[in-house]
Amino acid sequence: MKLLVTGGAGFIGPHFIRHVLQKYPTYSVVNVDKLTYAGNLENLRDVEADPRYRFVHGDICEAAAVREAARGVDAILNFAAESHVDRSILGADEFLKTDVVGTFTLLEAARELKIPRYVQVSTDEVYGSIDRGAFRESAPPKPTNPYSATKAGADLLVSAYWTTHRLPVLITRSSNNFGPNQYPEKVIPLFITNALEDRPLPLYGDGKNVRDWLYVVDNCAAIDLVLRAGVPGEIYNIGGGTEVENIVLTRQILRLLGKPESLIQRVTDRPGHDRRYALDCHKIRALGWKPGHDFGAALAETVRWYREHEAWWRPIKSGEFKAYYARQYVDRA
Ligand code: NAD
Ligand code: TDX
């Protein structure tokens, strides 16, 4: 099987590519990535010499480049996105381009080239916040921030290509991922690396927002299963089943690092901050998936990875990230 993976140089993409190349000796992967601030070829060093892997530096909004890369593949998996909520609040331009127009461009290529399978990697955020219970796949999208709105727009377009064109599409909606190689703008790597630098951990609002954490390799196994066994036209929720309040998560990270709670800095809340995400995962479980990692052990492993890979995150934090962080958190403090 030949796969086209987009956004394969970000956080989840490299884990998925590694998963596929290790598990299936006959598979090959073409990775199209624009290498935005979030793309980093360091994340793929261990696979780049594999003859079954090829990198193409390209933008999913460019139809000709997409068509060229997609020719002859058996499936497209679209991981490429602008993915950070706080950046979408500062400015949503690139979110509309990549998350919506990019998805449209890929769908058109898949239709024209009659690609047998298309997987859209989406998010629990499209459902919006839920106080009690959990969203099923049939719940209508109710996004609350520009990022989730563009992801929801993309999902609707993907579903429309099934209904209208019978393009064999599948959508995965996962909860918050964590693990090695996650860009340090997201809360877990931000808090781990700030703590390692003895800098404050900026906790939004009352710290009681809840996220359902999923170890990244478990998400990759689920996406692989949906690719192989999912029913075209269907949506699959993928949740870690571990709901944690941000304040609890923050204390857990500090404990793992042996750092004091005085590093916690309460800052102004994120505008439109979703209180709680929760997914009903009966559908993906019926396909035969469940999370394979315990949250506490996976968090400890992640903390260890950042501790041992300063050479990976220090250049990021002193580069593009620095200006972003100043803009983001100086205002809130
Ligand atoms: P990421 O921000 O770490 O990586 C995104 C990648 O896409 C980068 O390599 C970037 O260079 C690339 N990219 C951006 N614009 C592009 C374009 N126009 N053309 C080609 N490549 C482009 O994101 P991630 O955390 O790895 O998330 C991957 C996917 O999973 C996204 O679609 C995201 O919405 C979804 N998702 C993420 C999470 C999470 O917790 N990280 C949870 C649920 C869903
Ligand atoms: O500095 C921070 N302080 C803080 O309290 C940051 C960056 C976050 N937070 C809070 C906000 C959220 O309640 O932590 C929680 C997690 O925040 P993020 O890591 O920004 O993730 P979230 O907004 O939940 O979105 C993530 O999960 C769904 C990913 O970024 C999305 O790409 C994915 O779709």
Image: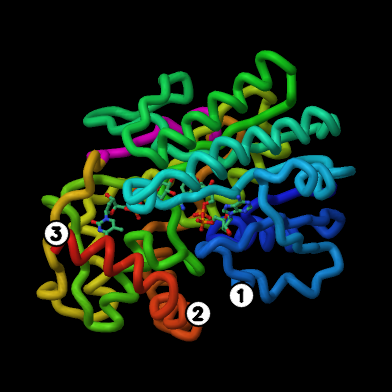
Nearest to the observer: residue 117 or residue 212: 117
Q: Which residue is depicted at the point 24% across and 66% down?
A: 252
Answer yes or no: is residue 305 visible. Answer: no
Q: Is mark 3 within 8 Å of ligand 2?
A: yes
**Where residue 177 sits: x, y (%)?**
45, 53
Nearest to the observer: residue 113 or residue 117: 113
Image quadrant assignment for residue 223: top right
Q: Which residue is depicted at the point 22% across and 31% down?
A: 131
Residue 178 vertical position relative to residue 50 in the rendered view, above or below: above
Mark 3 to mark 1 CA distance (whole Å): 33 Å
Residue 74 vertical position relative to residue 162 in the rendered view, above or below: below
The magenta span reads 274-284
* Pair 2/3: label in front: 3
Q: Which residue is mark 2?
A: 312
**Where residue 214 sits: x, y (%)?**
44, 51
Are the two marked residues, 2 and 3, in contact with CB atoms closer than 8 angstroms?
A: no
Residue 42: image tag: 1
Mark 2 to mark 1 CA distance (whole Å): 8 Å
Image quadrant assignment for residue 136: top left
